[in-house]
Image (cartoon, rainbow, N blue to C red):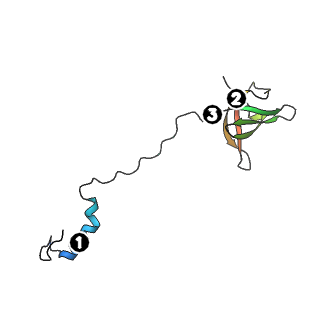
């Protein structure tokens, strides 16, 4: 629908009205968009479950398999009282980083 050039809106001529409408027209009748809500921290426990893949007691380290990833762990990362682990045992752990920034298992405990 086109309007004759003689019709004006608050002093604007036809071409100026088209320009203004092209800028504000699509938003007419819509409420302003609310700003995005901030992301919430996950409330789930950060502990993961896995199975001991290998543990060398004489060396004091081993590996835990969780999903498709293997995590290195040292005996010092085990919860107090946990002195020996066998292959296949279910454990829970948290993921930390070693000095080079690689993911490792920390706070290792037997799964209940």
Q: Which residue lies at the image location 14% right of the left edge and 73% below the top edge? A: 8
Q: Label 2's element?
A: strand
In the rendered image, residue 82, in percent from the top left (x then y), is placed at: 76, 26
Q: How far apart are marks 1 and 2 (CA)?
A: 68 Å
Seen from the viewer's position, the closer of residues 104 and 26 is 26
Please name whichever residue, 71 or 99, is drawn nearer the observer in this view of the structure.
71
Mark 1 falls on what kind of element?
helix
Q: In which quarter of the image is the C terminus?
A: top right
Question: Is 8 rendered above or below residue 24?
Answer: below
* Residue closest to the far right: 58
Q: Residue furthest front?
A: 1
Q: Residue at x 15, y 77 (%)?
A: 5
Please tell me which residue is depicted at 27% across the width and 68% down the height of the picture.
22
**Mark 2 or 3 closer to N-term?**
3
Outermost residue, top side: 112
Quadrant of res 83: top right
- Mark 1 crowdedness (10 Å alpha carbons): few <14, some 14-19, many ≥20: some
Image-quadrant location for residue 60: top right
Instruction: Please state the horizontal and vertical placement of residue 51, each as a whole percent of the image.
Output: 72, 31
Q: Name the residue under label 3.
A: 47
Residue position marked by numbered label 2 in the rendering: 91
Q: Which of marks 1 and 3 is nearer the N terminus?
A: 1
The Cα atoms of the two marked residues, 1 and 3, are separated by 60 Å
Q: Judge depth for marks 1 and 3 and give the one in front.
A: 1
Q: Which residue was labeled with disc 1?
A: 18
Q: Residues within 10 Å of mark 2 (few under 14, many from 20)?
A: many
């Amino acid at each position: 629908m086109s309007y004759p050039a003689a019709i004006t809106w608050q002093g604007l001529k036809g071409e100026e009205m088209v320009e203004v409408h092209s800028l504000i027209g699509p938003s007419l009748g819509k409420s302003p968009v609310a700003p995005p809500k901030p992301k919430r921290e996950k409330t789930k426990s950060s502990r993961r479950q896995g199975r001991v893949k290998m543990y060398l007691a004489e060396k004091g380290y081993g590996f835990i398999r969780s999903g498709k990833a293997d995590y290195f762990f040292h005996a010092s990362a085990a919860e107090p009282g946990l002195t020996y682990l066998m292959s296949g045992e279910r454990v829970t752990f948290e993921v930390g980083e070693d000095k080079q920034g690689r993911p490792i298992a920390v706070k290792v405990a037997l799964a209940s």
